Amino acid sequence: MARVLILGGGFAAVVAAESLAKRLGPHHQITVVSRNRNFVFYPALVRLAFGKSEPSDISFELRSALLDRRVQLIEAEIARINCRERSVTILSAEFAESCIKDAAGPRCRQGINFREKRSLVRRTW
């Protein structure tokens, strides 16, 4: 059984989780770690600002959407990525996974060795 950890709850994370859930059998575990419980489709914020859409049109709760696809959501901050040990520490736990997909975006990248991290992250679609 593979255990896949996806870091971040944005567009790349949702697409990666959906793609993996379709390709991997039910015996594999897929987990998304996001600091936010809601997904926001940022390109649609312009429409919201001009009154062309409602907040519910451009966002949804990640947990309920991902559970329909056999993906677990952990709402937490990422504290540390250890590429050598293939582990991720969040503020309340530590994970050692078969594959880690970083979809956390540029705000989480301070202090991470990019060369080392690229060797760990696998393309998932």
Image: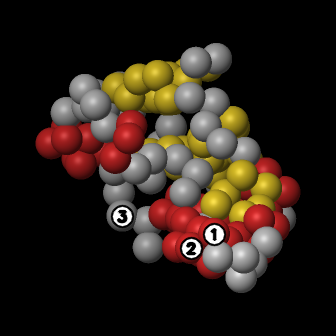
Residue 50 locus on image (x, y percent): 64, 76
Identity, as a three-letter code, of the amino acid under mark 2: Val
Element assignment for label 1: helix
Residue 90 locus on image (x, y percent): 55, 24
Which residue is at 64% across, 17% downward? Answer: 92
**Gap between marks 3 and 2, in whole Å?**
31 Å
- Relative placement, left or right, of 81 versus 112 is right
- Relative placement, left or right, of 69 versus 32 is right
Q: Residues within 10 Å of mark 1 (few under 14, many from 20)?
A: few
Which residue is at 79% across, 56% downward? Answer: 61
Element assignment for label 2: helix
Query: In this orientation, which residue lies closer to the viewer: 42 or 121?
Result: 42
In the picture of the structure, the residue carrying the numbered disc 1 is 49
Residue 25 in sight in this render: no
Residue 63 in sight in this render: yes
Residue 122 locus on image (x, y percent): 35, 57
Q: Quadrant of residue 58?
A: bottom right
Query: In this orientation, which residue lies closer to the viewer: 50 or 5?
Result: 50
Label 3 or label 2, whichever lies nearer to me, is 2
Residue 120 against residue 82 in the figure, above or below: below
Image quadrant occupied by the C terminus: bottom left
Q: Residues within 10 Å of mark 3 (few under 14, many from 20)?
A: few
Q: Are marks 2 and 1 in contact (CB under 8 Å)?
A: yes
Q: Are marks 3 and 1 in contact (CB under 8 Å)?
A: no
Residue 89 locus on image (x, y percent): 50, 23
Identity, as a three-letter code, of the amino acid under mark 1: Ala
In the picture of the structure, the residue carrying the numbered disc 2 is 46
Checking the image for residue 123, the label placed there is 3
Element assignment for label 3: loop
- Relative placement, left or right, of 116 versus 76 is left
- Relative placement, left or right, of 35 versus 111 is right
Which residue appears farthest toward the top when viewing the image?
92
